[in-house]
Image: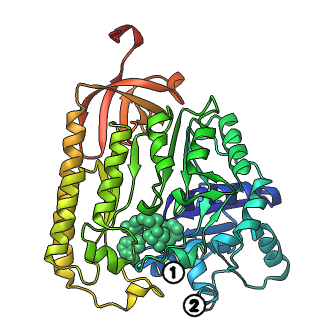
Amino acid sequence: MSKKIFIKTFGCQMNEYDTNRIFDTVKKIGFTKTEDIEETNCYLLNTCHIRDRAKEKVYHEIGRVKKKFESKIKPLVIVAGCVAQAENEEMLKREPYIDIVIGPQAYHKINNKIEEYLNKQKKIDETDFDATLKFSYFNGIKNSSKKVSSFLTIQEGCDKFCHFCVVPYTRGPEYSRPFDEIINEAKTLAKNGVKEITLLGQNVNAYKYEDYKLSNLILEIEKIPEILRIRYTTSHPTDMTNDLIKVYGISKKLMPLVHLPVQSGSDKILKLMNRKHNVKDYIKICEKLKETNPAVKFSSDFIIGYPGEDQKDFEDTLELIKEIKFSNSFSFIFSPRPGTTASKLELIDRKITLERLEIIQKQLFNEQIKINKSLENSIINVLTENKTDKGDKFFGRSEYMTSVIFNSNDEDVGKIVKVKIIKSNQNTLFGEKVNKSRLKVA
Ligand code: SAM
Ligand code: SF4
Ligand code: F3S
């Protein structure tokens, strides 16, 4: 019987990276990837625990799979990711349809666990933390990503313990991968045709291996000729060190969009959140980055309705948004996560929170629309990623991560092309590739 695995992924980019590494790993025991759930005999759900109803979403998904396979042979059902880590054996008790629960730091054991289950038919809970072993195992398995733009995890886990956040509990303590291992993986990706690498970590700018920091990694990856663009996410303001800021002045491949979550524009709330930085520190970092490279723009994450947030705190956040003019951002309603310090705090009125979210989003979206509109009639650099689903246009991204849909040709996939922007909306730019002969030489 052929072994087919279907993986559904929720959550952040690191989960996407993990999913690909799981595919690379299970290949060793004969599994091939399928996009068709109907033909799968191994169903894996890679879960996220960051906000509301994460757990319920998992049981709901499993319920749907159960229904689909009602009159067929049951597939092997694996729950992986951050909900698996947080809930572990509870999941096996609550939903007997689940066979294996495996946490993010135990993926190097996945093949053994699958085989163990297939041999003994005994439920398995594998949620140990062992990042060192995991990455040294993964290091022996080539990353097979062939996309134009790929992720590369360089750091995992978090020691910051922001009071609202579940990540330190689901991903464990901070761990940085060896420098050479990362460079080798970047070279493998380059050989596979990858042109853009996004370095990943829950605290990516806290990367430290021996004397190497994130700045060293960027400058070393920059030397790989096939790699045209480098990005990283997610960084914490307190780890935005001068050496990293300096790279924005010297690197030719590091993209000028800095995703730097601030969470709130109020010092009172930042303190309650245990963020370890204040608004002034944040603005200073943005200023330094702008001084180093005036092309730099910022995006951020905001939590609205954190316990204790009053009207003044909320207005301070609006003020900060006005000041920094974020080019795009994510805003979330505070969600109490089990086990975190903030989960015990009294929630503010839901109606007020929703009203504030609406106001914040309106302001963020207006800025986004304005920035995109200002690009109409200009020519920008776009890395062509793929054809659109309809197949009549191409999809790529600007240096600032904005999606661009444009007319082009197949040979441009993987290349940076000049695109004249004709139209725009909140999230997308639309345009036409400019042929070299039509470009004015300055
Ligand atoms: N490490 C990053 C940092 O320091 O900002 C963020 C990691 S988290 C995966 C992504 C975003 O989810 C956070 O920046 C925060 O805005 C949001 N988030 C985390 N916990 C949350 C919670 N309990 N409720 C609402 N949003 C939350
Ligand atoms: Fe969560 Fe980021 Fe804070 Fe770590 S630094 S606890 S990942 S929000
Ligand atoms: Fe979610 Fe875990 Fe990422 S909680 S955001 S999948 S680190």
> Does residue 129 appear left or right of residue 237 in this picture?
right
Q: Are marks 2 and 1 in contact (CB under 8 Å)?
A: yes
Nearer the observer, 374 or 434: 374
> Does residue 185 appear left or right of residue 17 in this picture?
right
In percent of width and height, residue 295 lies at 34, 36
The vertical placement of 281 against 433, above or below, is below
Local crowd at mark 2 within 10 Å, few (<14), some, or many (≥20)? few
- Which label's residue is closer to the chain start, 2 or 1? 1
In percent of width and height, residue 435 lies at 39, 14
Residue 26 in view:
no
For badge 1, the amino acid type reads: Tyr
In percent of width and height, residue 113 lies at 78, 74
Is the CB of the residue bearing disc 2 within 8 angstroms of ligand 3? no
Q: Residue at x 68, y 76 (%)?
A: 129
Q: Residue at x 42, y 31 (%)?
A: 382
SS for callout 2? helix
Q: Which quarter of the rendering shows the C terminus?
A: top left
In percent of width and height, residue 44 lies at 63, 68
Instruction: Give the Cα separation between the discs numbered 2 and 1.
Output: 9 Å
Mark 2, residue position? 94
Residue 86 in view:
yes
Mark 1, residue position? 59
